[in-house]
Structures are given as structure tokens and as C-alpha cells.
Amino acid sequence: MKEIIMITGGSRSGKSQYALKLAQRKTRRAFIATAEPIDEEMKERIADHQQKRGDKFLTIEEPFDLGRALCSLPDNIEVAVIDCLTVWLGNLMHKYREHYFLVQEKLKSFLDILSDLPCDLIIVTNEVGMGIIPFDPFTRKFRDLAGRLNQEVAGQAHQVIFMVSGIPLTIKGNSVWKS
């Protein structure tokens, strides 16, 4: 059975670095990047993440269809890191702003695949429900969808880790990969 580890926490809490560290316990790794280089700041973040990964991961850039990205992984991949669900959700909401049902279809498709994974999976996501209530309806919808998506993924995950100031706190399950 393939294992799912979900890593959540606030911005800059160390989620991505911890995910990479965990994934390096396996030999054949993939990294599914959801970010799009929409501005200079995002281009710099992407370059920084690429530099930190180096050539240790097969990288797949997929901002919209995580299900397809997972299903297209080579058969020899042992673990894939998805970084990150909330960026992916933001991409979907931006692209399908006028067609909310398409966002829901993509979320459902992704969640369905989690029950029959091609490899172990480490999913990075942001915890967005611990801050202020967003000002506008669109941002509140994003926050609500992200919260529901995180709950669904956490429900299927074997282990859920909450990152605080670079420190991993296990909030569900035990270590699925022994050191």
C-alpha cells in the first residue's frame, strides 16, 4: 500500500524543505511543482526551490491537473512530492473563476486518485484557517475550499505533520518511513 504524508503549516514554516528531506529517504523521486512564474517574486521563489532540489528529483511542472501529473509518473518512481496544494487551488480558482464547477471537478479528480497511488506521496499545503477572516467573498471562498481540501487530504493521509518555525509536529499517525 502506498503511503501519504501531508505536511501543513504557515508560510515559511519549513514545509517544503522538510518534504524534500523526507523524500530523500527514497532513491527514485519526483517533484510536482504547482507554482507558475507569474511575476518576478514568484520567479525568484521557483528558482530558489529548483536550486535546493538540484538534480535529485524528476521535476514535473503542473499548475492545473495534479491527477494527470500523478498518473503520468514513470513506473520506477518511489515517492512524489506535491508542492503545494494551496498554490494549485489558487491556480484553479484564477483559471476557472467564472466556472466554479470546474474547480470542484479538478479537486474531486485529485482526491479520487489518492486511493490508488502509483507511488508514496508527500503533499505540502498551507494552513490558511488560522488567520484573519478575508475581506472579500472570492478570498473567503478560497480559504473555505482550501480548508475543505486539506481536511479531505488529511483524512486519507497516513501521517499529517504540522510545521512550526521549522519544527515538525506529528498530528496524525506515526512515522511511516523508518529512518
Image (tube, rainbow, N blue to C red):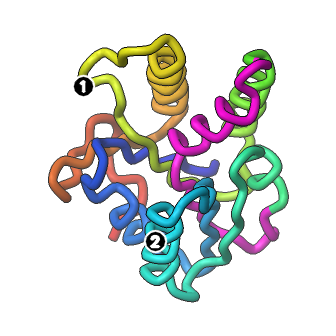
Residue type, mark 2 in image: Glu
Q: Earlier in the sequence, mark 2 or mark 1?
A: 2
76 inside magenta stretch: yes
The residue that appears at 64% across and 70% down in the rendered structure is 30
Point out residue 76 in the picture as x, y percentages from the top left corner.
75, 74
| Residue 72 higher or lower than 129, as above or below | below
Res 92 → quadrant: top right
Residue type, mark 1 in image: Gly
Point out residue 15 in the picture as x, y percentages from the top left corner.
34, 55
Res 155 seen here = no
95 inside magenta stretch: yes
Label 2 CA crowd tier, 10 Å (few <14, some 14–19, many 20+): few
| Residue 172 higher or lower than 143, as above or below | below
> Which residue was labeled with disc 1?
131
Task: Give the magenta-colored segment's residue range.
Answer: 73-99
Residue at mark 2 to residue at mark 1: CA–CA distance:
26 Å
Helix or strand or loop: what does disc 2 sit on?
Answer: helix
The residue that appears at 30% across and 42% down in the rendered structure is 9
Point out residue 160 in the picture as x, y percentages from the top left corner.
37, 40
